[in-house]
Amino acid sequence: MSDPVIISGGGPAGLMLAHELGLWGIESIVLERHATRDGGRSVGQALNTTAAELLDQRGLLDGIREHTAPSQGTHFSLLWLDSTPLENRHLPALLLGQEYLERELEHRAVKRGADLRPGHELTGFTQDESGVTVTVRSADGEYRLRGSYLIGADGENSVVRELAGIGFPGSSQPNCGLVADVEIDFGDLEEIHRGARFCPIGGLYSSVPVEPGVTRVITAEFDTDLPGASVAPTAAELRAGVERLNEQPFPDVPVRWIRRYGGPSRVADRFQDERVLLVGDSAHTFYPLAGLRINLCLQDAVNLGWKLAGDLLGWAPPELLDTYTAERRPAAVRAASATDTQLALIHPVKRVAPVRELVTTLLEFPDVNRYLLELSTGLNVSYAQPDAARPLGRRLPHVALTGPGGTSSVPEVQHHGRGVFLDLTGPDTGSDTGTGRGADTRTRTAAADRLAPWSDRVEVVVAEPVADIDARAVLLRPDGHVAWAGEPDDETLTGALRQWFGSPRR
């Protein structure tokens, strides 16, 4: 066995990656500099459609569902979009405090074999052709670890990124926000203080229920830089900010915790330096709007996990790991640009008011609404050429599947984290009279024979045709994106298998 993968950072990206590696039997060590969880002191409060579906395709959503609540919907710069095109095809956005997500990911990662080390902080590393040697500081002193790869999942102030010499440029209009948990039931707030809203003075306000008697409040104001770390935020500052934004006093209630957030949008120059890779906020950071930030973190993890596993298990083609940066960095650039565009529609309010009015009118056009809907939900991400026909490169709708064993679904067949060959010609009925099923059976046999040498990496699922999937067969990558689509016996399938899953087993 190879040395374990060392992950610096125990947030959503690092824990999701540890879980993904565990699905393939790859050992990981997660170094988390905080000795204890900080009580959920995160601005994260929502899962957009793609984030919810990524969790669902690994069976992780069930463990946190009790802590979720329905979202107001999907918006672009707090201009609410018509979600009808996604109904019955994709999951809705959900409200969820990030602490519940981290708790579940930690539980599941450890269950899959991850070695989680709270209070252990990476302070340095060296790398060579075969691995990485990491220096770690803990309460018991300093020690060294040997790993096959080092993953920087240590946030926007990443030590791993800095030590690797990877640039982190960025720019956007100055902004400063507050996030706090206050001791008041969400239902007891005045209506103007409930939910998310664009504020007429030029800023954003949001509140969501955390638990009975506790509400998370988030503010954002612009043309204001973050003060130094020595300037602690206060409850009075929070109430004053809310009153400016909503033009109504906020109740003087106890504040459990409060912190500032903000800063420019940034995307790393590159996501890999030999045996060091970046995921999550260490690779990209921007204003947390419409759930795009947490979505990007989870997508990084599921994109990298199986590619890293393939490399360590010896079946990955030489170029597979390079596709991580090639696919995820452009996605980060697009997400950061989409977020900056939304912020540009918020401030300065007098200048943007007519633009917001125009965009509101444009949203009445179905194509405009759908474009922004896919952008805001992350469903626009495709790893195929721009002119490729759907569903190539994209995620499939999360719809039901009917097969020989009964009813399942697109996310359910992806729980094991392997590739999936989805044959949608329907199960064998035992007769081909007037149905053409005999031909389909022969075709399926040919496809099964072709896939057999990859059976340790790709599972075969047979199901009835699905109206929402415009293909007779698809090859799904472990991250849920379509690598190939066509007829089950199409000879081009072999090329796609070699491209994404390496040489056949001998």
Image: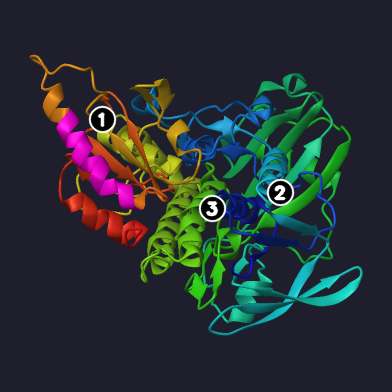
Q: What element carries label 1?
A: loop
Q: What residue type is labelled 1?
A: Leu
At which x and y percent is residue 146? 68, 75
Residue placed under numbered mark 1 in the picture: 424
At a point 48% along the width and 45% down the height, the residue shown is 417
| Residue 443 forms part of the magenta stretch | yes
Quadrant holding the C terminus: bottom left
Q: How far apart are marks 1 and 2 (CA)?
A: 36 Å
Residue count near mark 3 (Cα–Cα under 10 Å), binned few <14, some 14–19, many ≥20 = many
* Residue span colored magenta: 441-453
Give the quarter of the image for residue 2. Answer: bottom right
Residue placed under numbered mark 2 in the picture: 110
At which x and y percent is residue 336? 47, 57
| Residue 274 forms part of the magenta stretch | no
Question: In the drawing, what numbered circle is on residue 24?
Answer: 3
Quadrant holding the N terminus: bottom right
Give the mark toward the camera: 3 or 2. 3
Q: What residue type is labelled 3?
A: Trp
**Above or below for 438 versus 114:** above
* Residue 365 seen by the camera: no
